Amino acid sequence: MSDHDPVDEEPDVEGQPGEADAHIMALGELTAASGRLEFMAGILVVFLLNTHRRVADAVLEGFAFERRVDLIGRLAAAVLAPDSDLAHRVATWQAQARAAIQRRNQLLHGTWFFDEPDSGSLLNKKNVFERVRIEEITAHTAAVSAAAREALAIAKAVQEQRTGSAGRR
């Protein structure tokens, strides 16, 4: 059985405390990394709009992450050369960020059961159980962190393009 196959039987909800603690800590790290990604998406909006953070915050107020990513794509199309490397980086980042947040949502908004030591814990999504190991959560946290770093790198590249400082270093 792969880690993503549905589990046939109902889990033992008593669980294993050590296993639960480790999963909860890994989910906490994922939550923190996701917060950094959302923050860096806001920073990217700041640089694409060439404005202050408070202006970008006002624009983004009430936007779900998916809408923020869409806005970033529209802003990039408005201010970057269409076939530039930077425009392609934004498009790649959009796909990366969407996938990262979609899986984050599945992991964080599911119902968790901890039933077998060292076998991974069960995540219940709409009555389908999926076994999720800590290593998967850790790997996903790394992917979310990479998307956050890329958002910041793109923001810096946009700033350098505006100021013409890319060739001066």
Image (spheres, rainbow, N blue to C red):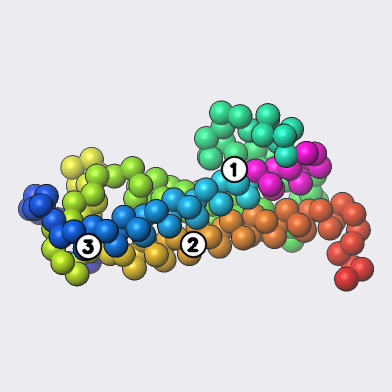
On whether residue 18 falls in the magenta region, the answer is: no
Which picture quadrant has residue 25?
bottom left
Amino acid at the residue labelled 3: Glu
The Cα atoms of the two marked residues, 2 and 1, are separated by 16 Å
Is 16 located above or below residue 53 in the figure?
below
Q: What x and y, as percent, mark residue 72?
A: 66, 43
Give the foreground label among 2 and 1: 2
| Residue at the disc numbered 2 | 143
The Cα atoms of the two marked residues, 3 and 2, are separated by 23 Å
Q: Which residues are magenta?
A: 42-52
Give the foreground label among 3 and 1: 3
Amino acid at the residue labelled 2: Ala
* SS for dot 3: helix
Which picture quadrant has residue 18?
bottom left
Circle nearer the N terminus (3, 2): 3
Amino acid at the residue labelled 1: Val
Q: Which mark is residue 12?
A: none
Q: What x and y, as percent, mark residue 165?
A: 89, 62
Q: Which mark is residue 69?
A: 1
